[in-house]
Amino acid sequence: MRRGVVAAGAAVLLLCAGCADAGEKVSESYESAVGKTGVAYDEGLSKKLRKLSREGGTAKLADLTVFNWEKVHVFFEGATAEEVERAVGEPVLDGKRYYDAGNLLVFEYNGKLSRAVSVIPDLLAIDGRHTWGPGVVLTARAPRSLLALSEK
């Protein structure tokens, strides 16, 4: 009986290790397929945006990020690689479109692309404008609403 329990435990560990490896491979292939600079999902920023939307209020985007930046470009699912490159000034996406179910935020620092992140879900309302400076403010007009971007 004890050997059976040990064998079952070992099988579960091997299965979990296999899942972890597969997860890493999926993540790496996703990032390499989506962007040359490694468009990555930003869980921390996504949580902060969801909380702001849920509770309502206002926050500076710079206060919600943990890295330095001077300019941010905001896009929606379906944005073309050409549209993103025109706004940013250099290639960001390997494919023809941004296909994540959230916003793509491309940050610049010292005039160069510094980070490209995906935040889920799609909570940002940009009113046709893609580029914002470091003073951009996010406002939830009511709890559980989209976050309107503005510069004061």
Image: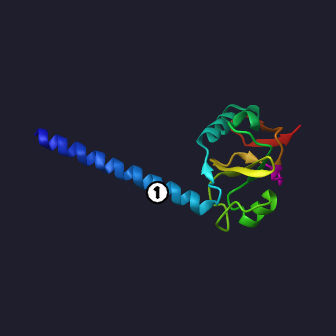
Q: Is residue 80 a member of the stretch shown in magenta?
A: no
Quadrant where the C terminus lies? Answer: top right
Q: Relative to 120, is 52 above or below?
A: above
Q: Relative to 122, is 84 above or below?
A: below
Residue positioned 21% across, 45% down in the render = 8
Residue lying at the far bottom of the rendered structure: 96
Q: Relative to 152, is 79 above or below?
A: below
Question: Is 35 positioned to the left or the right of 129 in the image?
Answer: left
Instruction: Tell me where residue 69 sits by quadrant.
Output: top right
Residue positioned 77% across, 38% down in the render = 138
Quadrant where the N terminus lies? Answer: top left
Q: Residues within 10 Å of mark 1 (few under 14, many from 20)?
A: few
Residue 33 on image: x %, y %: 58, 63
Q: Is residue 129 a member of the stretch shown in magenta?
A: yes
Residue 142 on image: x %, y %: 74, 35
In the depicted view, which residue is nearer to us: 33 or 103?
33
Residue positioned 17% across, 40% down in the render = 5
Which three-letter amino acid code belongs to the residue tagged 1?
Lys
Residue 35 on image: x %, y %: 64, 59
Q: Which residues are magenta?
A: 126-131
Task: State the residue position of label 1.
Answer: 25
